[in-house]
Amino acid sequence: MPRPALFLAGRAFREYRRRGGSRTGVLPDFFIGAHAAVAGLPLLTRAPRRYRAYFPDLALIAP
């Protein structure tokens, strides 16, 4: 995974925790979102609100 994606995932997860997020199994979602954002790829997801909240420039495909 590119270093910029790791940094972006860490920032997004920190913001999630700052906003009161308490779930522990969400870190992989932040890695996936950050990797797609850095690579400029769209992301297929069932949770578009979460990705839009932390990766506003990420192109999403939501069924």
Image (spheres, grey):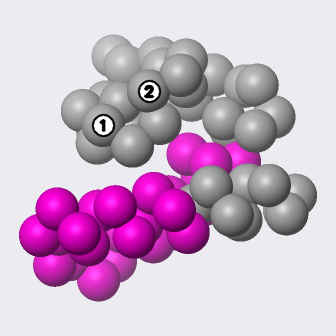
**Residue at x 16% of width, y 78% of height:** 22
Residue 59: say if magenta.
no
Where is residue 51 drawn, in percent x and y? 38, 38
**Residue at x 30% of width, y 37% of height:** 53
- Identify the image quadrant of the C terminus: top left
Based on the displayed image, in which of its 4 quarters is residue 41 positioned?
A: top right
Number of other residues with Cα within 10 Å of mark 1, as a class: few under 14, some 14 to 19, many 20 or more: few
Residue 55 vs 26, above or below: the answer is: above
**Would residue 54 be visible to someone looking at this image?**
yes
Give amino acid for label 2.
Answer: Pro
Predominant SS along the magenta part: helix
- Location of mark 1 (residue): 53
Is label 1 in a helix, a strand or a loop? helix
Q: Which residues are magenta?
A: 10-35
Give amino acid for label 1.
Answer: Ala
Where is residue 39 drawn, in percent x and y? 81, 34
Where is residue 60 drawn, in percent x and y? 48, 20
